[in-house]
Image (spheres, rainbow, N blue to C red):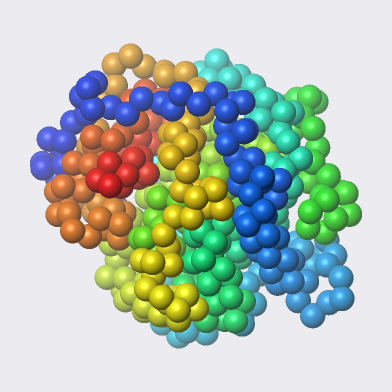
Amino acid sequence: MRFRYSLLAATLLVSQFTQAAPAALNLEQVRTLLESTTPASSNSQFVDFDTAVQQSLIAALKGDASQLTREQLEETKQSDKLADKQWLKQSGYDFDKKTNQQVGIQLLGAFPSLPKSTLDASLKTVENVNLNATDGLRRQALIDAEGQNHLYFLADALGPKLGAAFLRAYNKGELGKAAALIKASEVSTSAAKKQFNYPRPFLVTTTLHPVPDNAVVKDNKPYTATEGSFPSGHTNTGYTDALLLGEMLPERFVPLVERGARYGYSRMVLGVHYPVDLMGSRMVAQRNVAHYLNDVKYRVLFDDAKQQLRSALEKECGTSLAHCAKPAGPADPYTAPQMKAFYRFTMAYHLPQEKEQVSPLVVPEGAEVLLEGPLPHLSAAKRRQLMVSTALAGGYPLSGTTSEQNFWQRLNLVDAVSSTQ
């Protein structure tokens, strides 16, 4: 479905008083904060769990082979054990990927008009992030990159208890419907990459540091990437998967959405994407997930997968999911208050505002479905109001000239949910 704009939604305008300002974190503070989400964390409980996640990923990539090779890495998808592909195939659901790809291209239509000053600032941000990345950030970026076709990366955002339950259930194939549906819901960015044809950062500057693989295949081959840079396919994966699992596990919605942003940041650590690439992917992923959740036929599949997932995790936890999902302090870095500031930072990456006069925010009909999982007690109208009152200030790159571009760029789901807690 294409989003329509109601008269009610059109009255929900953003004032200067209610706009959420860009995060105050600088790049050095971001690096320090994110180090706690890597294998170099100072918390031994998180490191042990992160090691278990990495080992599960490598085992899944390796399959029955005695050793993981780069050839396997490039071809491995979720196995039939992990994902119930037959269930999804039998449903006959049409994801209509080509239409959604074209809608995504339109949504990103402001990209060719970005001024050179913004593109230059975007490149400088990549250089800063890549060149100053710690070993922990580089190792995590490699793990994130090579785990794109699986859901293991999401376990980090579930906390030590629920995360361990997720890891056990996923490895045993008990989350098969959710695993199949979430991955099938990703809309490829290849058509957009071809349309915009923007070169990768490492193709336009020689200053970037190639990151050798010492974490997954461990052959020290420098990580690289193909196709165009804008938008980011991996970041689209991160946001799509995180949003859908967050809708199924609303107890951890905010940490999961933050994990989607963190997944995108890894692409700059590797020097293969600009911040505008990550911002564009957030926009299209939000729109695509809302589109599917508003489709009655998709919702039948979603509810089935959600029920299976929640039942399996509750069994593994041995307690209610509410108890299992409770924050766990330093061992649970995605619940740290500073992560909300990190998420705000990723909405614009300190890139300059392009316009002093900005269009009012208009909420598309149906967009409020993204807050339905974490905020089921609120009416649709109230959820739309929250989307407005917590939105990013206007005028940042990609907010464009249309209502759709303006809304999906400025939507801050983390602050919208957190503002009610």
For image coordinates 25% across by 45% down, the residue present is: 420
The one nearer the camera, 32 or 239, is 32
Image position, residue 260 (x, y; %): 51, 49
For image coordinates 65% across by 36% down, the residue present is: 268
The one nearer the camera, 370 or 307, is 307
**Residue 234 shown left or right of residue 328 in the figure:** right
Image position, residue 377 (x, y; %): 18, 58
Image position, residue 279 (x, y; %): 49, 37
For image coordinates 78% across by 46% down, the residue present is: 223
Whether 66 is drawn above or below 231: the answer is below
**Residue 174 shown left or right of residue 363 in the figure:** right
Image position, residue 60 (x, y; %): 70, 72
Mark count: 0
Whether 237 is drawn above or below 6: the answer is below
Whether 225 is drawn above or below 407: the answer is below
For image coordinates 47% across by 75% down, the residue present is: 317
In terms of image quadrants, where is residue 77?
bottom right
**Residue 222 shown left or right of residue 85 in the figure:** right
Look at the image and tell me in which quarter the N terminus lies: bottom left
Q: Is residue 96 visible?
A: no
